[in-house]
Image (cartoon, helix red, strand yellow):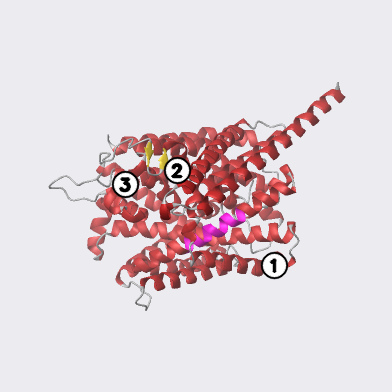
Amino acid sequence: MNSLVVAGIAVFLLLLGYVFYSRKVKQWIGLDDSQITPAVELNDGVDYVPAKHWTILFGHHFASIAGAAPIIGPVIACLYWGWLPALIWIVVGGILFGAVHDFVALVLSLRHKGKSITTVTESVMGKTSKILFGTFALLALILVVAVFAAVAGKTLASTPEVVIPTFGLVVVALVVGFLMYRVQLNVLLCSVIGVALLFGLIVAGFYLPIRMPVENAETAVKLWTVILLIYGMIASVTPVTMLLQPRDHLAGAVLYLGLLAGLLGLVVTRPQMKAPAVVSFLTVKGWMWPMLFVTVACGALSGFHSLVSSGTTSKQVKRMSDARVIGYGGMILESVLAVLAVIAVTAGLYWKSVPEGIEGHVFQDVSANGNWIKAFGTGYGQLTGVFFDKMGAFLGITGLGALVGITMLKTFIMTTLDSATRITRYLCNELLGETLGITPMKNKYVAVALVGICSGALALGNWRAIWPVFGAANQLVASLVLIVASVYLLMRKRNCAFTAVPAGIMLVTTIAALLYQAYGFATAEGEQRNILLAIVSVVLIFLAIFLAYTALVAVAKVRKNGAGQEAANA
């Protein structure tokens, strides 16, 4: 089957979802520009700052939620279950689940002074629910910071060509931020200047690769990891207009151009799909349901997005109506990125073997040992070779397309690292400082130090030991957020079916995935057995059941009060 047809149908459906369904969601949830946003009301020049234009905030939000996850999940799903089920979940999940989830999380935070979704939980389902949900979210975020720092550190150590563009982006962002907010240059002109400088950094990185002056590769990875953690801590306490907004705006611009190059390359080359549409319903990774639906998270539905929406994004929204294009639109664009990832590895790479007499790369070989980013970068290079090969030859750079693809992902990993660190600091302030009354945790510097120490211990230790349950835990967060949103809407006598149905489906799916994982961890033989992860999976199941029960109790109270009010009126 022609990959252009496949991608065209998927992208067209996603665009239809934004144009029509997001309009209905906006109507159901009720957005009113007469309401003052937290960024305007609580402007403090550091965390609460209205973005100069919605496009700047869109870049931050999109770069923060994207990262490498919408690439890695679909790539894994294509290898084990096939590209067709992966694409169906990306399109359906993106329109009806993920974009709705991100949108409502952002709106709920805007209506609660920019506080996190865990604080919203308290107003809907009580303090106990907030503490349990907040603790779980805090631990999950610490793991995210640790993993992204460790993965980025490994990338810097193994691909020294991306060191200069990775850290050079920080300097470029500072320059662009100065031009944008101090000099008051046009946003488009600032974007052009920033992207041009970043492309120059990519070229410089190829000719001037930077390696750690150590012989041991593991030591190099750890040193880069520590540097990245320190960067994340410093960046998370700087004013958003100084670094976060301009850097993420540029990171978004890089992805827009990368997406455009990938889609145009697809239009020009129109390769056939080389991988089977469906590989198997049962693989070593488990049954297609429920495991595919927790493997492909970002790109379809991700609980982490709600923490971004209610963490950094909600504190920078200038107008309430901007929540639609940022919250819903940002998720739709991420789904488009996930579609490109699917096409890159199933049409840009060969399946199991390369036909005789043809040059190319094999999906299974490139992705060996979990090298999913390399698989995407290689496939992306094949799709965009029509553009980047000639440009690379002119600049003397071989494999420029793959290098651009990897740099694009690396840029988002840095963005997510900063945003996740800042959001974790917010949660420490809200949960530990305000709710539990631990006074030192109200201080942002003390809170970020705690985040850095805990994340560093995991990043330099054995974070892989608990990572296998993160996919299901991430989807558990998403289902719980949709539950909270449903109760919130019901309490205000608004339509909640558009959040309640996805919430129920994902709650059942996540619990099934956790049960499957718990059984697998407990019954595996030899070194594969992991009783700790089995226990963690069971604990998460009980957490989901408790919060779902709390939501049902809240709904029962709403209905009882409503019936009592109707009787009184009669």
Q: Which residues are magenta?
A: 137-149
User: Which mark's residue is nearer the viewer, 1 or 2?
Assistant: 1
Report the front residue among 375 and 469.
469
Say which residue appears at 59% left-offset and 61% top-offset.
422
Q: Quadrant of the N terminus?
A: top left
Q: Position of residue 562 (x, y in %)?
A: 79, 29
Report the front residue among 566 and 385.
566
Q: Earlier in the sequence, mark 1 or mark 3?
A: 3
The question of residue 242 being in magenta is answered with: no
In the shown orientation, is residue 47 left or right of residue 91?
right
- Residue 122 lies, with reference to residue 243, above or below; the image says above
Q: Earlier in the sequence, mark 1 or mark 2?
A: 2
- The local secondary structure at tag 2 comes to helix
| Residue type at numbered disc 1 | Asn
Residue holding disc 3: 345
What's the mark number on residue 443?
1
* Direction front: furthest residue: 526
In the shown orientation, is residue 351 left or right of residue 336?
left
